[in-house]
């Protein structure tokens, strides 16, 4: 079993300067070392099964979750090092944890933290955590704190988990079947989105697909017609962001203010839901806010 241990601010989310798309991100704050006690039988099973079987039976969403944790922890950098805690790599693993996990998943406690080894260890560890804890939200909380508790999370921990799950783009609940996908995603580059006015592109590792489309000119618009029971607009918010008028089926629903004190590369800035699926048209129009007019689209997600 895994010990819960005391909660401490651990890896912490990375902070990015608003508008600095593509800028290098700093390493995160210190993480406490997690101690893992594994029954001898489990160790023997892992030694026989190996990483290849883990990959073959990976839980749904593992790849997206790994990407989300990596973006929050290190901005996706394999060489990121926390000068205070010593946490290292794309997933900011503590030195003591690395030795234990490398022994368990690579068969060598002294294995180098190469990009390939970091991926193998993180994949195996997160797979085991998901099978134990049952949801990606709880895995994200454990990754930060080393605790399996389900309630009374600190505001710091809740914020961390929220940011991970925003990038992940889902609820984090386990999937027991494989039905027709319940969501459909339209990236900023989708030809289904009808852009009017001048729109440009910007890059940042925190964006889905590392890119958004943005406009600053008043009246520039993006329109999507879809069939579904809900829609979510994901985009960046921050000090340089402006306002946008959002209309559904030709009717103004809300003027969304994207300005925040700090930059968040991927936020759910607008959503709408209906009782049953139907045909709808979403239109996003740039207001052209004086001094900070930027409005960006990362993804439009349709719930069907």
Image (tube, rainbow, N blue to C red):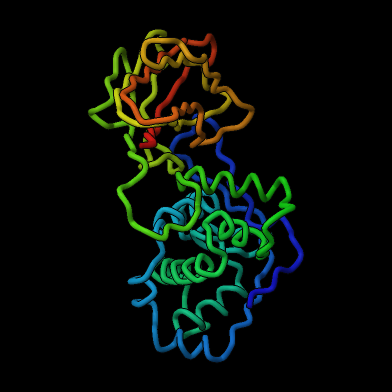
Q: Residue 112 appears at what percent x and percent y?
A: 47, 75
Tell me the quarter of the image containing the N terminus: bottom right
- Give the side of residue 215 with respect to residue 110, left or right: left
Furthest-right residue in this view: 6
Q: Residue at x 33, y 19 (%)?
A: 281
Looking at the image, residue 234 lies above or below residue 148: above
Looking at the image, residue 198 lies above or below residue 154: above
Q: Residue 247 appears at what percent x and percent y?
A: 42, 14
Between 272 and 50, the one nearer to me in the picture: 272
Q: Residue at x 39, y 36 (%)?
A: 303
Between 180 and 218, the one nearer to me in the picture: 180
Quadrant in which residue 98 is drawn: bottom right
Q: Residue 58 appears at what percent x and percent y?
A: 39, 67
Q: Residue 60 appears at what percent x and percent y?
A: 39, 59
Quadrant in which residue 259 is drawn: top right
Tell me the quarter of the image containing the C terminus: top left
Between 56 and 221, the one nearer to me in the picture: 56
Looking at the image, residue 79 lies above or below residue 249: below
Quadrant in which residue 6 is drawn: bottom right
Furthest-left residue in this view: 191
- Give the side of residue 261 with respect to residue 171, left or right: right
Q: Residue at x 45, y 84 (%)?
A: 46
């Amino acid at each position: 079993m895994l010990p819960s241990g005391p909660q401490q601010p651990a890896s912490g989310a990375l902070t990015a300067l608003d508008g600095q798309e593509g800028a290098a991100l700093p390493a995160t704050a210190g993480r406490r070392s997690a101690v893992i006690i594994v029954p001898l039988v489990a160790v023997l099973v892992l030694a026989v099964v190996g990483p290849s079987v883990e990959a073959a039976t990976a839980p749904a969403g593992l790849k997206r979750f790994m990407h989300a944790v990596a973006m929050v922890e290190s901005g996706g950098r394999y060489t990121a090092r926390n000068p205070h805690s010593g946490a290292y790599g794309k997933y900011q693993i503590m030195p003591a944890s690395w030795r234990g996990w490398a022994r368990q998943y690579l068969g060598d406690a002294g294995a180098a933290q190469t990009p390939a080894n970091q991926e193998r260890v993180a994949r195996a560890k997160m797979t085991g955590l998901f099978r134990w804890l049952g949801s990606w939200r709880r895995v994200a909380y454990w990754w930060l704190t080393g605790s399996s508790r389900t309630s009374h999370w600190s505001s710091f921990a809740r914020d961390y988990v929220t940011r991970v799950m925003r990038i992940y783009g889902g609820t984090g609940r386990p999937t027991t079947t494989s039905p027709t996908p319940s969501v459909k995603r339209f990236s900023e580059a989708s030809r289904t989105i009808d852009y009017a006015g001048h729109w440009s592109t910007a890059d940042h590792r925190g964006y889905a697909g590392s890119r958004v489309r943005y406009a600053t000119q008043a009246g520039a618009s993006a329109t999507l017609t879809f069939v579904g029971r809900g829609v979510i607009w994901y985009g960046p918010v921050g000090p340089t962001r402006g306002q946008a008028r959002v209309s559904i089926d030709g009717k103004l629903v809300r003027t969304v203010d994207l300005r925040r004190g700090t930059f968040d590369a991927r936020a759910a800035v607008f959503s709408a839901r209906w009782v049953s699926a139907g045909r709808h048209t979403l239109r996003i129009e740039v207001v052209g806010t004086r001094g900070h007019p930027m409005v960006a689209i990362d993804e439009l997600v349709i719930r069907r």
